[in-house]
Image: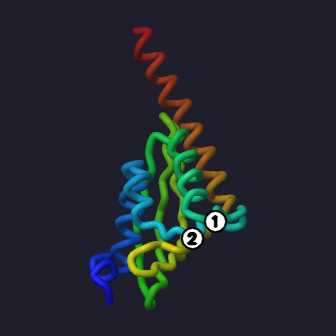
Amino acid sequence: MTKAATSRPGPITAVRSFLGALETLDVDHAMTYAAPDMVYQNVPLPAARGKAAVDNQLRTLCTYSTGFGAEIHNIAANGSTVLTERTDALHIGAWQAEFWVCGTFQVTEGRITLWRDYFDWSTLLVASARGALRAVGTTANRLVAGSR
């Protein structure tokens, strides 16, 4: 094994570090865990293929997002395959949506070659609607409090 291979994190550590970097919206750091041929897909949407395409997609998401959370409930590895069960939280200003996600990652020599997330679209839509109602309520409360 080469020195470079031994200095790279194991599969679970790479996935945790990658998601942790995304939680701070640090795409540059997250992409240090990406392989050149990385594939990222939210099933059933089309996949982003290649590090540049994944980087572009994550930067676009971060442009609109004010926060991201990935609460890992379960994580397991079988060789280079890492499975996560998580609750993801997306934030855009006062809007927030939390939803269950199951992710599959393939990690080779500490670099993620595949990131595929599965979630229930109806759950995401309901979470989005709840987030919108909370955001409207928060904004209305601020307006009322400011007018006193």
The residue at the point 72 percent across, 66 percent down is: 44
Q: Residue at x 58, y 37 (%)?
A: 133
Where residue 60 sits, quadrant-wise, is top right
What kind of residue is marked 2?
Answer: Asp
Are the two marked residues, 2 and 1, in contact with CB atoms closer than 8 angstroms? yes
Q: Which residue is mark 1?
A: 49
Q: Position of residue 52 (x, y in %)?
A: 57, 57
Q: Can you give x and y, in whole percent of width and height, for residue 71 in the image? A: 40, 62
Along the viewing direction, whichever of 109 and 125 lies nearer the viewer: 109
Which amino acid is tagged 1? Arg
Between 21 and 95, which is closer to the camera in this rendering? Answer: 21
Residue 73 image point, x, y percent: 41, 71
Residue 37's disc number: 2
Q: Earlier in the sequence, mark 2 or mark 1?
A: 2
Mark 1: secondary structure: strand
> Which quarter of the rendered picture does the C terminus lie within?
top left
Structural distance between the alpha carbons of marks 2 and 1 = 7 Å
66 relative to 2, above or below: above
Q: Percent position (x, y) of residue 143?
A: 48, 17
Secondary element type, mark 2: strand
In depth, the one of 43 and 119 nearer the eye is: 43
Please indicate whether residue 41 sits to the left or right of residue 36 in the image. Answer: right
Name the residue at the top extreme. Answer: 148
In screen coordinates, is 100 left or right of 145? right
* Quadrant hosting residue 45: bottom right
Q: Is 116 situated above or below 30?
A: below
Q: Is residue 32 above or below residue 75?
A: above
